[in-house]
Amino acid sequence: MLPHLVYFLLLGAFLFCVGLMLVLTKRNAVIMLIGIEFMFNAANINLVAFSQYEPTRLQGQVFSLFVIVVAAAETVVALAILIQVYKHFKTINLSVINEIHKR
């Protein structure tokens, strides 16, 4: 027996809210990337949860795979950029970088 859809939607909403909170409140670039990944995973949970109620179609799983591929590519590019920013500014704190860049 499948669990109710509401539980999956609540879990997805919780993960999305945690990710959004991390992106909006933290100034560390790595923590912000983790928040974005939380939001991607919340979308994946919702996609797979909705597709479980139509077992003959696999659109939710296919879209979820696309989201995972995009998230992996985004992480690789973002970490490469962060490495270059760290080499130049010697910090990844976005507030400090903003202050240094304004000078």
Image (tube, rainbow, N blue to C red):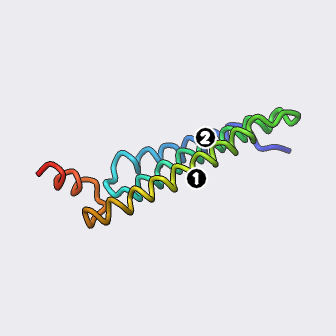
Dot 1 or dot 2, earlier in sequence: 2
Residue type, mark 2 in image: Ala
Q: Secondary structure at mark 2?
A: helix
In the image, taking residue 78 as reference, residue 48 lies left or right, namely right
Residue type, mark 1 in image: Ala
Q: Secondary structure at mark 1?
A: helix
Q: Which residue is disc 2 drawn over?
A: 43
Which numbered disc, 1 or 2, marks the residue closer to the eye?
A: 1
- Residue with the most extreme right position: 56
Q: Which residue is disc 1 drawn over?
A: 72
In the image, taking residue 31 as reference, residue 38 lies left or right, namely right
Q: Residue at x 52, y 43 (%)?
A: 16
Residue 82: image location, x then y, percent: 38, 59
Residue 56: image location, x then y, percent: 88, 34
Front residue (pair 19, 82) = 82
- Quadrant of residue 59 within the rendered picture: top right
